[in-house]
Image: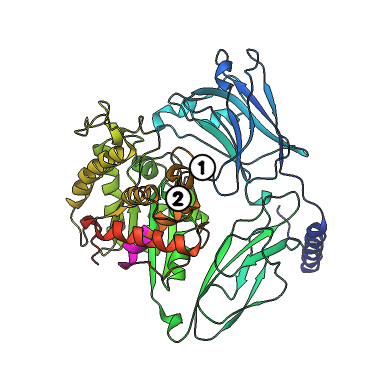
Amino acid sequence: MKRSLPSLAIGFVVAMSLAATVCAQDEKPASYALTKVRLLAKPGTEAQLAGGRILGSQESATTAMVPLAQVAAAPAEGQWLEVAVTGARPYRYVKFAAAPGTSVCLAGVEFHSATGRLEGSPFGSNLPKDREAVAFPKAFDGDAATWFEFPDGDSYAGLDLGRKSQAPRPRFTPPEGGYADAQEVKIDVWPAGAVIRYTTDGSVPDASSPVYTAPVKVARGMTLAAMAFRENLAESDIALASYRIGAGAADVPQVVSYHIGNSLTDTVNGFLSEVAASGGKNLYYMRKTIPGCGIEGNWNLNEKGFASPEGWMNNYPRVFAEKRPAHLFLQPFPNPPGIDSDGEFGGNFIRLAREHNPAVQPWLYAQWPALKWGKDAHCEGAGWMKPVWYPPNRQPATWEDAMANKMLYYGEMFDRWNALEGEKPVRLVPGGPALVRLKKAIEAGEIPGMTDFNAEVFDDNIHLTRKGRYLVALVHYACLFGESPEGKVAHANSGLNAGQARIFQRIAWEAVITEPRTGVKK
């Protein structure tokens, strides 16, 4: 029989639990800084580990990765390889990445700190559903007879160590939003024990930023940014809060958006909400993303992948039913590739969204080629796509040519989705075309302090730096609200100065108003 505790006993247990929590705040947490990584290859493929890299990031599984160590030589057949990591600070996301262009068969991977083996949620290069037998979880299952096999190069497998590995994220009281009068904003963390640093212009706090000691007075429109720091832990996620102050500031209607895709959809995560808030908008942003996954995969893998602002928001039927988003963003991606796949499953998402909100605005999010675009079927076409698809220029000579090919594919998908019956036609988000404009501006010397497009804008072969992500968020802002962001939004979290940010804002607006499929006019 299940017994219940008497109320006094319950009170005693709760009090003891709270006391333990308070005491734990003063204890030094276990270290999450990597000291070594252990790797085991599929027998006979050990040589492919050579040149591989150990990487860490505070942001995500795919962006802002910092090199921590490199595999100097392959191990003997059947032997574990131990890679030492020295001097690394803690990171939430850690991974092994194969040398560029190298495929690996990884039977095992372990990440260790000074206090033991690290545990977390595995992630890795995504494979189609029909290849689950060799998907990235096999590198973490403890069975040397199974392995993660990614045949096309640029493979990786890692762990998200979770929020336990980070200092707690700061909170703002009152929360961001519109207020008629000036506010005294408090910044705190729970549990306590971390140092909070903040800025008042939305820039990323660092060691030179002021330490929070007293409430911050907000008497005008302002974007606050705060981060928490604690020994042995990765710094917290950046916390951003934008405030609108003045008559009518609290009455701005809410706009609800839902973004479905992969890590390229995540480009705007952590940027779009604050760009919108700093521009006086009230945006409720939601997303469901699976790294490397296409539209079909996201449809079939309900309740899988990353989600925000709540963990359950990867459950898209529930999101459509409960939140009834006004805007739905879908990202075609060649995994699995093909107009039939993107057309069918993109159509499924659009129809389901319209069932709950007939006035929903669907968007086709057009992203960009990798710097090395040769394996992107949207850039060069492929005979194995369904149906077979090739652009007129099968061998694009430049990144811009590859982008033009992608736009041809998006155009065909755009037409197919617009053949569906619905109140509002599908519109297009020109993320990739905006980057083409930015590239031309940098190469023409139009942006002071920026001379190298690849280095300034790309974090790796495909993912963007904060600067690139800010531009793509500005494009989304212009599409969502049908207005220029110029002089209206903060450059929070972008790494740009005010002058550079203003040029980025102009480029984003020009990309949107010169693309007729956005439906936005000057």
Residue at x 29% of width, y 62% of height: 360
Percent x, y for residue 121?
59, 41
Depth order, front residue of 403/196:
403
In the rendered view, does 14 fall on the left or right side of 234? right
Q: Earlier in the sequence, mark 2 or mark 1?
A: 1
Percent x, y for residue 186?
65, 74
In the rendered view, does 254 fall on the left or right side of 26? left
Count of numbered labels shown in the rendering: 2
Question: Mark 2 and 1 residues: CB-CB less than 8 Å, in contact?
Answer: yes
Q: Is residue 339 above or below residue 39?
A: below
Q: Is residue 198 above or below residue 308?
A: below
What main secondary structure does the magenta stretch of the protein show? Answer: helix
In the rendered view, does 198 fall on the left or right side of 387? right
Examine the structure image and report whether residue 477 is included in the region drawn in magenta.
Answer: yes
Q: Secondary structure at mark 2?
A: helix
Residue under pointer 2: 266
Q: Say which mark, if any, is on residue 19.
A: none
Residue under pointer 1: 62
Q: Amino acid at mark 1?
A: Thr
Percent x, y for residue 346?
29, 47
Q: Is residue 355 visible?
A: no
Q: Amino acid at mark 2?
A: Asp
Coloring basis for residues: rainbow
- Label 2 crowd (10 A; few <14 / some 14-19 / many >=20): many
Q: Secondary structure at mark 1?
A: loop
Question: Cα distance, mark 2 to mark 1?
Answer: 10 Å
Which residue extends farthest front? Answer: 445
Depth order, front residue of 107/488:
488
Q: Which residues are magenta?
A: 475-482
Examine the structure image and report whether residue 262 is included in the region drawn in magenta.
Answer: no
Q: Is residue 436 above or below residue 98?
A: below
